[in-house]
Image (tube, rainbow, N blue to C red):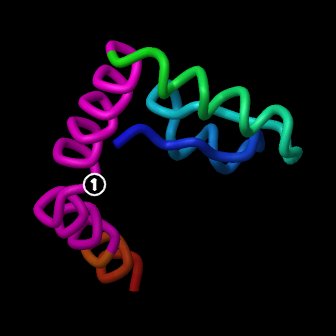
Amino acid sequence: IPTIATNNEINKEILQETGIYVEPNIKDCSEKIISLLKNENLRRKLGNDAREKVVNIHSWKNRGQILTEVYEKCLKSH
């Protein structure tokens, strides 16, 4: 499922190229939704790219590894 989010730095950092960004107004939001509804290839690409990112970067295994590294650094510094 493609993601539509407001155009701000936090959303851009998280979604990167896997999201559609809108200004916080009804006109821009509705135009982007209609555009996605009309473009099946774009919907599929954004959805697939987002899923791949979640599986590869935000998986439990990867997050667990990052957390373990943080704990190990904390233990070494004390």
Q: Where, by quadrant of the figure, is residue 66 drawn?
A: bottom left
| Magenta stretch encompasses residue 49 | yes
Quarter of the image for the N terminus: give it.
Answer: top left
Q: Position of residue 21 (x, y in %)?
A: 67, 34
Q: Classify 63 as above or below 29.
A: below
Q: Which residue is found at the position 73% from the left and 46% from the top? A: 6
Q: Main secondary structure of the magenta part?
A: helix
Q: Residue type at mark 1?
A: His
Image quadrant where one finds the C terminus: bottom left
Dot 1 corresponds to which residue? 58
* Residue 43 falls in image quadrant: top left
* In this rendering, position of residue 66 left or right of residue 3: left
Q: In this image, 9 relative to 42: left or right? A: right
Q: Is residue 60 above or below residue 1?
A: below
- Please state the horizontal and vertical placement of residue 62, each as a whole percent of the image: 18, 56
Label 1 SS: loop
Instruction: In this rendered view, identify the residue nearer to me: 39 or 19.
Output: 39
Relative to 37, is 69 on the left or the right?
A: left
* x, y percent for residue 51: 24, 41
User: In the displayed structure, would residue 49 be above or below residue 4?
Assistant: above
Whole-percent x, y for residue 54 in the image: 27, 48
Relative to the observer, which residue lies in front, 26 or 15? 26
- In the image, what residue occupies the spot 84% across and 45% down? 26
Q: Look at the image and give the residue range highlighted in magenta.
A: 41-70
Q: Residues within 10 Å of mark 1 (few under 14, many from 20)?
A: few
Whether residue 29 is in magenta: the answer is no
**Is residue 3 shown left or right of residue 46?**
right
Q: How many marks?
A: 1
Q: Quadrant of residue 31?
A: top right
